[in-house]
Image: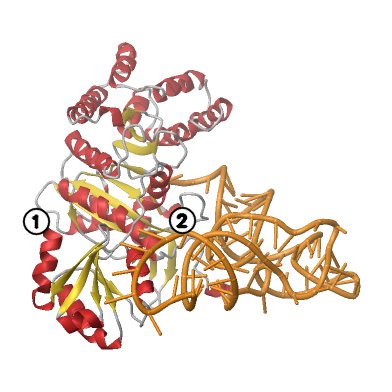
RNA sequence: GUGGCUAUAGCUCAGUUGGUUAGAGCACCUGAUUGUGAUUCAGGGGGUCGCCGGUUCAAAUCCGGUUAGCCACCCCA
C-alpha cells in the first residue's frame, strides 16, 4: 500500500486546499491583466538539452529527468524561462515589442523537500523581451510588487533586494581581475552573508592566488553593505581617482538612477532596497538581479529574477534583451497564512431548495434546472430528508434564500421563499417564480 | 546527495516500569425531531499503532533496518 501513496514532494489538493491555490492564481492573473502581460503556455515536458544548454550540466542533479519510450532524454520543466525564451526566439521578428508575457503553471525539480520547497509547485513567471533599458526593470518590478500587494501584503510585509551583476563585473575588472575570476568572486559574494570572514578570505585566496586578499575582502564587504543610490554613488566617487571609474561603470550608475528613479516615481521606493549581496546562482543573468523577501526573514525568497540578455540568442534566436522573474505558490501561501491574509474560501449557493417528498421533487427539479440555466447557484438534498434536516442543511450551506417545494404549496400553485437572514417567508406563484427571484437578488 | 529529530483515526493528540478487546476532542453519519436554522443529548462508522524483521510468555511501548515527514547542509529556477 505504501507504494500507492503520493510521491514525495507532490501535493494533492482537497477542495479547501484547491480553492486557496485558485485564489492565488486568480489574483496573479488579475494583476497580469492590469499590467498588460499576456498569458501563454508551453509544454510541461521538455528536452533535457534545453536546460543543459542554458545552465551547464551540473544543474542536471536538480532536474526531474528521465528517458522516454522513444529513447529521448526529457525532463519536467524546472522553470519557465528556457521554454518561453525559445518561443520568443522563434518568432522574435514578428512579435510586437516590448513582449510582455506571463505564465502561471506547474514546475518540477528533483530535490529533497523542506519548508517552502517541494518537487512540484506553481509559479508565476513574467518576462519582458525587447527592451534593454532599465525602464523594463521598472515595469517588471512594479508588476512583481503588485502581484504581492494584490493579496493585501504591504511594504511592511516584504521588500525587494536589488543588485547588479554588471556593476560587480565592471568594478572587479577595473581592478585588473579577469572576467573568469570575477565570476568566481561573485559566488563568494553570494555566500558572504553566511560564511565567516575567514572562510571568505580563504575562498578569495584560492581564486586569486598569491597576494593579499584582505583589502579586496573589505571592499567587497563595503559594497554589500550599500543600501541606497547615494551610498552607491559615493562609494564609486571615492574610488574614481585611482582607476575605479571606468566609462562602463559610470554608465552603469546612470542605469541605476533610471531604475530607482522610475520605481520612486511609481511610489514604490519603500518596497525596494539596494543590496549588492544578492547575486543569484544561475549563470545566465547579465545585469540587474533581484529577490523578494518577507521583512521578518522568516521564509525563504518569495520571488527572484533578473536580466538575461544573451539567452534568446543562446537558444537559437536573434539578439534580444530580456528580463524576468518567477514567484512560487508555496512560500507565498506560507506568508499569507502567517499574516492572516489567506481567506477562508466559502462557496455558498444562492438558493437552497427544500423538497417535501418524491412527488414534489419533480416540480422542484424542473425549476432547479431552469434557474441554474439562468445562472443561479443552487443546492438541494439528493435524498429524501425530513424538513427540519433540510433547513439545517440550508442554513449550513450559507444560501441566501431557500425555496420550499412542499405539498401544501404546490397544491396552491406557489412555492414558499424564505429569506435566510431575515427569517421571513413569502409565497411566490409558480408562474412568476423567475421574476420574483430576479427581483430578490437585484433588490 | 549528507546529518539530526519524528511517525497512534480524516485532523490535533493521550496511551504509566512491556500486560486483556488501543482512547479523547474536532470532523463525518444516524436518531431524539414526519413542515422550519448553526445549540443540546444519545448512538454509529472509521486504526495491520508508517512498513519489515528481532528480543520476549507477551510489543503501540525495547532493539535493528526501511520508507515517509520535519529541520539544517548542498542547491536554489
Q: Position of residue A310 (x, y in %)?
A: 26, 45
Q: Position of residue A152 (x, y in %)?
A: 30, 41
Residue B47 relative to residue A343: left or right: right
Circle on res. A272: none
Q: Chain of mark 1?
A: A
- Which is nearer the eye, A167 or B52? B52
Q: Counting residues from the N terminus, which is met first, the one under dot 1 or under dot 2?
A: 1
Q: Position of residue A391 (x, y in %)?
A: 34, 69
Q: Residue furthest bottom?
A: A359
- Which residue corresponds to the image point at 29% horizontal and 28% vertical from the top-left? A270
Q: How is the image coloured?
A: secondary structure
For disc 2, the neighbor class at 10 Å (few under 14, some 14 to 19, many from 20) is: some
Inter-mark Cα distance, 1 to 2: 38 Å
Q: Position of residue A390 (x, y in %)?
A: 35, 73
Quarter occupied by the C terminus of chain A: bottom left
Q: Nearer the viewer, mark 1 or mark 2?
A: 2
- Which is nearer the eye, B7 or A215? B7
Q: Chain of mark 2?
A: A
Whether residue A48 can be seen here? no
For disc 1, the neighbor class at 10 Å (few under 14, some 14 to 19, many from 20) is: few
User: Could you say whether the residue bearing mark 2 is in a helix, strand or loop?
Assistant: loop
- Which residue corresponds to the image point at 30% horizontal and 39% vertical from the top-left? A286
Residue A141 relative to residue A207: left or right: left
Circle on res. A118: 2
| Residue A282: quarter of image | top left
Q: Are marks 1 and 2 on the same chain?
A: yes
Circle on res. A94: 1
Residue A186 relative to residue A257: left or right: right
Q: Disc 1, disc 2: CB below 8 Å?
A: no
In the image, residue A194 above or below residue A119: above
- Which residue corresponds to the image point at 15% horizontal and 61% vertical from the top-left? A441
Amino acid at each position: 500500500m505504501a507504494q500507492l501513496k503520493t510521491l514525495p514532494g507532490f501535493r494533492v489538493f482537497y477542495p479547501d486546499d484547491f480553492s486557496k491555490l485558485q485564489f492565488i492564481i486568480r489574483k496573479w492573473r488579475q494583476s497580469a491583466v492590469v499590467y498588460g502581460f499576456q498569458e501563454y503556455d508551453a509544454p510541461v515536458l521538455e528536452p533535457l538539452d534545453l536546460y543543459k544548454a542554458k545552465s551547464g550540466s551540473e544543474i542536471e542533479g536538480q532536474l526531474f529527468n528521465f528517458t522516454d519510450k522513444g529513447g529521448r532524454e526529457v525532463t519536467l520543466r524546472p522553470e519557465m524561462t528556457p521554454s518561453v525564451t525559445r518561443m520568443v526566439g522563434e518568432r522574435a521578428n514578428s512579435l510586437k515589442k516590448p513582449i510582455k508575457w506571463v505564465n502561471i503553471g506547474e514546475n518540477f525539480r528533483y530535490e529533497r523537500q523542506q519548508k517552502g520547497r517541494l518537487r512540484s509547485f506553481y509559479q508565476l513567471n513574467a518576462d519582458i523581451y525587447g527592451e534593454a533599458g532599465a525602464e523594463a526593470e521598472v515595469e517588471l518590478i512594479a508588476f512583481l510588487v503588485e502581484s504581492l500587494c494584490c493579496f493585501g501584503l504591504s511594504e511592511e510585509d516584504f521588500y525587494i533586494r536589488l543588485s547588479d551583476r554588471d556593476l560587480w563585473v565592471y568594478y572587479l575588472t577595473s581592478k585588473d581581475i579577469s572576467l573568469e575570476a570575477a565570476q568566481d568572486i561573485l559566488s563568494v559574494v553570494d555566500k558572504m552573508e553566511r560564511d565567516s570572514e575567514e572562510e571568505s578570505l580563504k575562498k578569495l585566496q584560492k581564486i586569486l592566488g598569491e597576494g593579499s586578499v584582505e583589502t579586496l575582502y573589505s571592499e567587497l564587504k563595503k559594497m554589500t553593505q550599500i543600501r541606497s543610490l547615494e551610498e552607491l554613488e559615493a562609494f564609486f566617487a571615492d574610488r574614481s581617482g585611482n582607476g575605479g571609474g571606468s566609462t562602463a561603470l559610470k554608465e552603469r550608475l546612470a542605469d541605476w538612477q533610471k531604475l530607482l528613479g522610475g520605481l520612486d516615481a511609481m511610489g514604490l521606493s519603500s518596497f525596494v532596497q539596494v543590496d549588492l549581496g544578492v547575486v543569484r546562482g544561475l549563470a545566465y543573468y547579465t545585469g540587474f538581479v533581484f529577490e523578494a523577501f518577507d521583512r521578518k526573514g522568516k521564509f525563504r525568497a518569495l520571488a527572484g529574477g533578473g536580466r538575461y540578455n544573451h539567452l534568446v540568442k543562446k537558444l537559437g534566436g536573434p539578439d534580444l534583451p530580456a528580463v524576468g522573474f518567477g514567484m512560487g505558490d508555496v512560500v507565498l501561501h506560507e506568508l499569507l497564512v502567517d499574516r492572516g491574509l489567506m481567506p477562508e474560501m466559502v462557496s455558498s449557493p444562492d438558493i437552497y431548495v427544500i423538497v417535501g417528498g418524491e412527488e414534489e421533487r419533480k416540480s422542484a427539479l424542473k425549476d432547479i434546472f431552469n434557474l441554474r440555466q439562468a445562472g443561479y447557484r443552487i443546492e438541494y438534498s439528493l435524498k429524501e430528508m425530513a424538513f427540519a434536516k433540510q433547513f439545517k442543511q440550508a442554513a449550513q450551506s450559507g444560501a441566501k434564500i431557500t425555496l420550499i417545494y412542499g405539498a401544501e404549496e404546490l397544491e396552491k400553485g406557489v412555492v414558499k421563499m424564505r429569506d435566510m437572514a431575515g427569517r421571513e417567508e413569502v409565497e411566490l406563484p409558480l408562474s412568476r417564480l423567475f421574476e420574483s427571484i430576479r427581483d430578490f437578488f437585484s433588490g
